[in-house]
Amino acid sequence: MTAAIPISLEVNGERVEADVLPRLNLADFLREQLHLTGTHVGCEHGVCGACTVRLNGVIVRSCLMLAVQTHGASVETIEGLSDSGEVADLQAAFRDRNALQCGYCTPGMLMAAQDLLKQQVEPDRERIREHLSGNYCRCTGYQAIVDAVEITARARMGRVL
Ligand code: FES
Ligand code: FES
């Protein structure tokens, strides 16, 4: 039997100490041990983007990382971005533009969209599509999601569509 390994990391600004099995991926660690179920699991092999989180400020697929690899790191999940209000305007735009239906992809979409808007103040629709191309949505057809990101970018610039 494999022994659990102690790790210490920051999750949404709070110190977390835990014992994890070496094979446990970050998505399952967040969901099952920390009960941060906003991080969703879809494909479990790095394709759908539902499990997107921030690791030391950079978005990553949490299904492709082992929890032990986050020792000493800072992890931010959709709960952290939501509680801090960082993505409040994006969330409102998603609601207003009907950019979510079942909502399964939404946490990952919001993480990826916010990542883009931090890098680029006013991306055009092509750039938005490109940046979100690693996040799959089975419901919306993407148009409304691009609308929501675009209107948020413009609102942050002080303009409204
Ligand atoms: S669950 Fe990680 S990319 Fe799909
Ligand atoms: S809203 Fe259902 S998968 Fe995107």
Image (tube, rainbow, N blue to C red):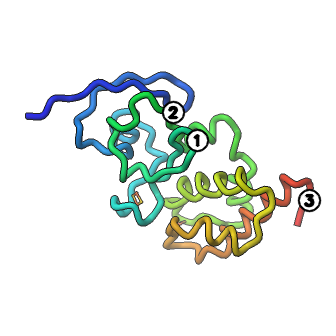
Look at 36% across and 38% down and name the residue there: 69
Amino acid type at image mark 2: Ser
Q: Are marks 3 and 2 in contact (CB under 8 Å)?
A: no
Q: Residue 87 in the image: state x and y as whole percent.
A: 69, 46
Q: Are marks 1 and 2 in contact (CB under 8 Å)?
A: yes
Q: Residue 64 in the image: state x and y as whole percent.
A: 36, 53
Look at 68% across and 68% down and name the residue there: 128
Q: Which mark is residue 57?
A: 1
- Mark 3–mark 2 distance (CA, rounded to whole Å): 33 Å
Q: The residue tagged with tag 3: helix, strand or loop?
A: loop
Counting labels gives: 3
Looking at the image, is mark 1 or mark 2 earlier in the sequence? 1
Q: For the residues carrying marks 3 and 2, which lies nearer the camera in this image? A: 2
Look at 70% across and 39% down and name the residue there: 85
Q: Which residue, given by chain and number where applicable, does mark 3 sit on? A: 159
Amino acid type at image mark 3: Arg
Q: Measured along the vertical axis of the image, is residue 131 above or below residue 108?
A: below
Residue 35 found in image quarter: top left
Q: Going by the image, does 74 lie left or right of 147?
A: left
Q: Residue 152 in the image: state x and y as whole percent.
A: 78, 58
- Mark 3–mark 1 distance (CA, rounded to whole Å): 27 Å
Residue 151 found in image quarter: bottom right
- Mark 1–mark 2 distance (CA, rounded to whole Å): 8 Å
Q: Measured along the vertical axis of the image, is residue 3 above or below residue 117?
A: above
Crowding at dot 2, Cα within 10 Å, few <14 / some 14-19 / many 20+, comes out as: some
Q: Measured along the vertical axis of the image, is residue 29 above or below residue 147?
A: above
Crowding at dot 1, Cα within 10 Å, few <14 / some 14-19 / many 20+, comes out as: few
Q: Which residue, given by chain and number where applicable, does mark 2 sit on? A: 74
Q: Going by the image, does 47 lie left or right of 2?
A: right
Q: Going by the image, does 69 lie left or right of 107?
A: left
